Amino acid sequence: MENGKRAQWGSNFGFIMAAAGSAVGLGNLWKFPYLAGKNGGGVFVLVYLLIVLFIGFTIMLGEMAIGRSTQLSSYNAYQRISKKWAFVGGIGVIAGFVILSFYSVVGGWVLNYLYQTVIGGIPADTAAYFGSFISDPVAPIFWNMLFMAATALIVFKGIGGGIEKACKFMMPALFVILIIISIRAITLPGAAAGIAFYLTPDISKLTAGTVVAALGQVFFSLSLGMGCIITYGSYLGKEETLEKNSIIVPVLDTVVALLAGFAILPAVFAFGFEPGAGPGLMFITLPQVFDKMPFGWVFGILFFILVLFAALTSSISLLEVTVAYMQDHHKWGRTKAVVILSSFMFLIGIPASLSMGIWSGIMIFGYNIFDFLVFISDILLPLGGILMCIFIGYVWGIDKAVAEITNGGKIPFKLKAFWTIMIKYVAPIAVIIVFLNALGILKF
Ligand code: PFF
């Protein structure tokens, strides 16, 4: 709320930069390339693209419609339409809280890596450095605090003057840097093997595990299933074309994920590293790659600026989900909500950070604290997505959703038939099957 009236994006472009900013994040740059590396390269990419096309677009449009229709953030939006379904919005608020708690730990690592690169480079034994940095009881918490403070500062400034402004600067910059780095990587001698690995789908590598990993990644990467797009959609005006927006945002997100693969995998191959190196790919392998590259110092700095921008434009959307809930539901002011929520999330991030070091022995259901938070979000997002599809298809009703998308028939809706079938039948059933499989309840 700004001056008692609900805030709105300054322009549709501003909304797209903010929504794409939320979507494009550590998920694209850090997780996508290593998941692709681990799950058979091209096969993973292919499955991922299909899921974005059929399920990502469908849920994105559904969330935008709920948000814009009610002009409320997720909990209150669901509640406005059906009191019984408010809990789905509640799941989203909890997910936002949990995700930002661990996300900003990694955001802090990125800040430290940027700083270290600027002042002279990561020590040659990058694996040892990474291990000792993340297990240190003090340094990562300090960097996490800085990252959370930067996130809080932007959200504190509100929708137009904070989030939109920041994303309109950071997102175009991110694209430019990513393109420069991708060109550098694919023109390295020996890069062809990486490109082939990345682009050639070997169907024999297609397993249930690949599909589960790709589906979870689509939800996380597109910021779906937790009311983030509902919240951002609630600041949209009625004249904007939701259908177009919900194509553009996933396209931008996917282009960045694919480019991240081009920026990273060919370089990894060119210098003889392992593509499936896991989460360490960005923090262990890449610094070595930069070290071996001509002008690697410059590329290293550019790369970590890029990752920082991606992480920040996502972390502000996570914080905004919880802040908007406090504003809409509990009538808190923005400043109070930002200060209290970001402080709490930072505090929860402390044990998550310590679980990489002195608290690594503390296990919850077989996970350390950090991985447990990731596990909770891996469950909450698809769950939120399934419930949203059922909600639109059978509670709110397709007709009302279509009336919102078309602004009462004024805006054409070309994919109406496709979207209806997807949201009523295909998306919920597909997500339920994969979800049960991921939980080990249904094995195929
Ligand atoms: N989409 C972000 C990423 O790929 O890093 C993470 C994220 C942001 C998830 C916002 C969920 C969300 F609501």
Image (tube, grey):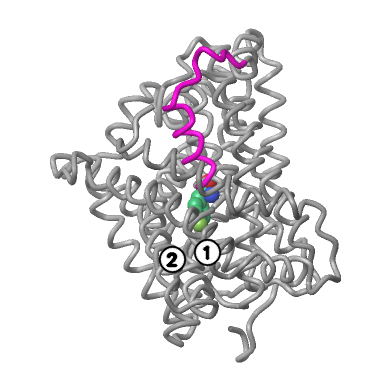
Picture quadrant where residue 136 is located: top left
The magenta stretch is 201-219
Name which residue lies at 47% across and 73% down. Answer: 75
Query: Does 375 sit left or right of 285 as displayed?
Result: left
- Which image quarter: residue 279? top left
The amino acid type, in three-letter code, at marker 1 is Phe
Please determine whether, in this image, residue 376 is positioned above or below residue 271. Answer: below
| Nearer to the camera, 323 or 46 | 46
Q: Which residue is mark 1?
A: 391
Mark linked to residue 88: 2
Q: Give the answer, above or below, for where 32 lies relative to 428.
A: above
Is the C-beta separation of discs 2 and 1 under 8 Å? Answer: yes
Q: Residue furthest bottom?
A: 4
Residue nearest the observer in this picture, 253 or 166: 253
Q: Quadrant of the C terminus?
A: top left
Badge 1 marks a residue whose secondary structure is: helix
The residue at the point 39 percent across, 63 percent down is: 91
Give percent across and percent down for residue 202: 57, 13
How many C-alpha atoms fall within 10 Å of the one at disc 1: few (<14), some, or many (≥20)? many
Q: Nearer the viewer, residue 267 or 276?
A: 276
Q: Position of residue 229 (x, y in %)?
A: 59, 61
Q: Residues within 10 Å of mark 2 (few under 14, many from 20)?
A: many
**Residue 221 screen position, x and y as percent:** 54, 45
The residue type indicated by label 2 comes to Val
